Image: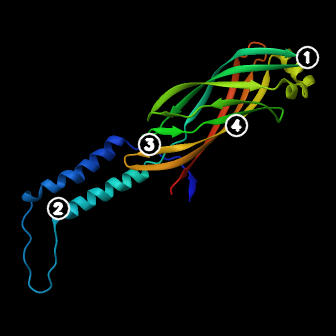
């Protein structure tokens, strides 16, 4: 199994399909081509139709192989409380993270379920569940991810958290690995996307003040 990161320019699927159709239709055009001349000596079978079909097929195959996926993009839109449980001396909370996801590729993607890890001051604070699903090519969709934060772990950074509440800025980090497969015509390739997010939120009203998201895609050729 080989893997590599890919970030190549977008290739139109209509161009790929046109080349494929060309290779199929050329087989019906043999009557337009001049008959092959017979030569003395060693026989050499040559067909312009076969040559053109072979060339078109090679170009189509090269085009499809070159249509490597681009990294999808993720953007956190909002955070919303769904449960607030006071268990002195800590508080457990459940949230809904609304995430906007863009698939810039010419192929649909199918991904398995996973969990997004949420960190505060380097400590794992909680996780958000990502259900298995799919996304159409060159499309956007909104995911609503249920998350749970462990108040006991937050209490370990009590003084820093109080300071963040006072200044209305709290820095969180999140990471997730999403695996699945992408299909281009008759080929399927497994992939894995690693996403890191650096978020600044208002801990009082849960507004997203700033964010920086980076993703890295690995395409498995075999």
Considering only order in the chain, which callout, 2 or 4, is on the residue closer to the N terminus?
2
- Across and down, in percent, residue 123 comes to 83, 34
What residue would you read off at disc 2?
Answer: 49
Mark 3 or 4: in front is: 4
Considering only order in the chain, which callout, 3 or 1, is on the residue closer to the N terminus?
3
Vertical order, 164 against 122 (above or below): above
Residue drawn at point x = 37 percent, y = 46 percent: 185
- Across and down, in percent, residue 106 comes to 42, 40
Q: Are marks 1 and 2 in contact (CB under 8 Å)?
A: no
Mark 4 or 2: in front is: 4
**Helix, strand or loop status at disc 3:** loop
Q: Residues within 10 Å of mark 3 (few under 14, many from 20)?
A: some
Considering only order in the chain, which callout, 4 or 1, is on the residue closer to the N terminus?
1
What residue would you read off at disc 1?
Answer: 88
Q: CA distance from mark 1 to mark 2?
A: 81 Å
Residue drawn at point x = 36 percent, y = 42 percent: 13
Q: Are marks 3 and 2 in contact (CB under 8 Å)?
A: no
Circle on res. 175: 4
Q: Quadrant of residue 207?
A: top right
Considering only order in the chain, which callout, 2 or 3, is on the residue closer to the N terminus?
3
Circle on res. 10: 3
Q: Are marks 3 and 4 in contact (CB under 8 Å)?
A: no
Residue drawn at point x = 69 percent, y = 29 percent: 128
Vertical order, 22 against 153 (above or below): below
Q: Residues within 10 Å of mark 1 (few under 14, many from 20)?
A: few
């Amino acid at each position: 199994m080989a893997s590599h990161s890919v970030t190549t320019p977008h290739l139109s699927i209509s161009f790929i399909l046109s080349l494929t159709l060309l290779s199929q239709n050329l087989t019906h055009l043999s009557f337009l081509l001049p008959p092959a001349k017979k030569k003395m000596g060693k026989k050499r079978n040559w067909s312009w139709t076969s040559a053109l079909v072979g060339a078109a097929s090679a170009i189509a195959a090269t085009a499809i192989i070159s249509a490597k996926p681009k990294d999808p993009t993720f953007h956190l839109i909002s955070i919303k409380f769904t449960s607030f449980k006071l268990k002195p001396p800590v508080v457990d909370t459940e949230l809904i993270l609304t995430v906007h996801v863009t698939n810039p590729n010419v192929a649909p993607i199918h991904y398995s379920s996973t969990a997004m890890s949420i960190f505060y001051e380097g400590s794992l604070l909680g996780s958000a569940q990502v259900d298995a699903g799919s996304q159409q090519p060159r499309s956007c969709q909104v995911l609503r991810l249920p998350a749970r934060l462990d108040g006991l772990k937050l209490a370990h950074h009590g003084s820093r958290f109080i300071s963040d509440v006072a200044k209305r800025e709290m820095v969180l980090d999140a990471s997730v690995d999403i695996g699945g497969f992408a299909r281009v015509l008759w080929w399927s390739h497994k992939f894995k996307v690693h996403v890191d997010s650096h978020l600044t939120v208002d801990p009082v009203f849960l507004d997203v003040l700033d964010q920086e998201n980076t993703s890295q895609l690995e395409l498995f050729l075999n």
